Image: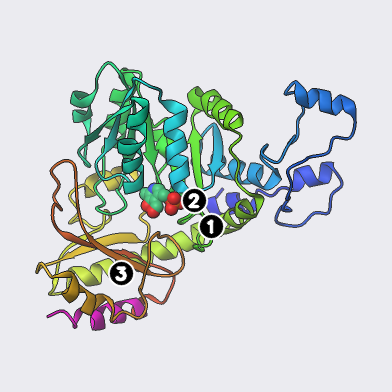
Amino acid sequence: MKAETKIISRLWTTDAREKHLPITINPPVYRGSTVLFDNFEDMVLAGKGQYAGPTYGTDRFPVQRCMEEAMRELEGGFITRIFPSGISAIQNFFYAFSKSGDHILIVDNAYGPGVRFCKKILSKFNIETTFVPSSVAEDIEKYIRPDTVLILLESPGSNTFEIQDIPAVAAIARKHGIITALDNTWATPLYLNPFTLGVDISIQAVSKYISGYSDVLMGAVTVNERYGHILDTYYSTTETYTPDNDCYLALRGMKTLPTRLRQHEQSALQVAAWLEKHGNVDTVIHPALPSHPEHHLWQRDFSGSSGLFAFTLKKDYSMEELGLFIDKLNQFDLGYSWGGYKSLLTAAKQRRNSPSRFAGKTIIRLSIGLEGVEDLILDLEQGLEMLP
Ligand SMILES: Cc1ncc(COP(=O)(O)O)c(C=O)c1O
């Protein structure tokens, strides 16, 4: 069955039919702290942890459960838990799977606030972080210590797009009994399946492509069977939950993910090909282009590319000069996040902990939206003419 059919055909109707509730195509949203039990016996069962449904407002209402099940199925994992943002998913993943005295490894192109969390917060709990090169492969082994417990990959990185050799890292990690996790936001589970590559935990910033409309903050952590119990226990013990309204929007957005992603992919490839021929452009950084240094890994492991990529310019323009180009754009708005229907742009100099092919370079990152691609190209053309 095609991914789009699978995603659309999975509805909440089984539950509704069993309970004789009105059946709408999308599940109903609940608001509440207290959940009422039919009788005392049910309350006693809830107290023993043996009641089947939600027992309290923090106990994952139906839309959250549907969203988690849809994500789990898409990722091909064992269980999924939803968090109130992508960064919250990353932070809680660290809390759930590491403890005081542990050592963790993170790729140097990982999402900045996640890196900051390790440096500023995990260090307070005596958890030490080492950053490994963004295109790490078997050489991960030289960073492993007896106290290393987990490795967080992000492939490609969401600013500089280096790709890691995921199966090579996962195989070495498994040999040492270390957990491998991957921030899979760029590819989504549609274009990369982390579990078939040996990864144990997949993290998604649902805020991007999965929800798709830039109106939800959400993250998801999906684990394989080996780590299901740890995630489930952590989640229910911390009484983390995500409001039903957000789960509703994310689940609704997910129904159109395959169709949207295909368009993001095609438009981004067209814009990237056009930029590669532009006289002012130095490098177009897009894993699906043969010019990308790890293109062979992308070809081997991924089944598609999304709409986020970057480029650098030949001259080292000042921020004022760059502003002449960027502020001239009509179709690319300036804002953080990506993966929505609206095209966005960010530009910043790269700072790294380890040597990088982009050290000191200004990376101009485009999130290609669902506008007409001809209009996006015309817009970039007239904007780039403003550069001195
Ligand atoms: C790769 C990646 N992971 C995680 C996040 C965090 O997601 P959120 O914005 O929902 O906190 C982002 C946000 O930009 C991201 O780019």
Q: Which residue is mark 1?
A: 216
For marks 3 and 2, give the CA distance. 25 Å
Relative vertical location of residue 146 with respect to residue 39 in this rendering, above or below = above
- Residue 270: mark in rendering: 3
**Is there CB contact under 8 Å for labels 2 and 1?**
yes
- Using the rendered view, name the quadrant where residue 135 is placed: top left
- Mark 1 residue type: Val
Pick the front one: 124 or 299 = 124
Q: Could you tell whether 179 is left or right of 256 in the image?
A: left
What is the crowding at mark 2: few (fewer than 14 residues within 10 Å), some, or many (at least 20)?
A: many
Marks counted in the figure total 3
> Residue 117: percent from the left, percent from the top?
36, 40
Label 2's element?
loop
Task: Mark yes or no: residue 185 visible.
Answer: no
- Ligand 1 lies under 8 Å from the Cβ of mark 2: yes
Residue at x 75% of width, y 48% of height: 13
Residue range corresponding to the magenta coloring: 375-388
> Residue 113: percent from the left, percent from the top?
35, 47
Can you name the residue that lies furthest to the right here?
39
Give the prevailing secondary structure in the magenta stretch. Answer: helix
Relative vertical location of residue 280 with respect to residue 13 in this rendering, above or below = below
Task: Mark yes or no: residue 215 visible.
Answer: yes
Q: Could you tell whether 242 is left or right of 166 in the image?
A: right
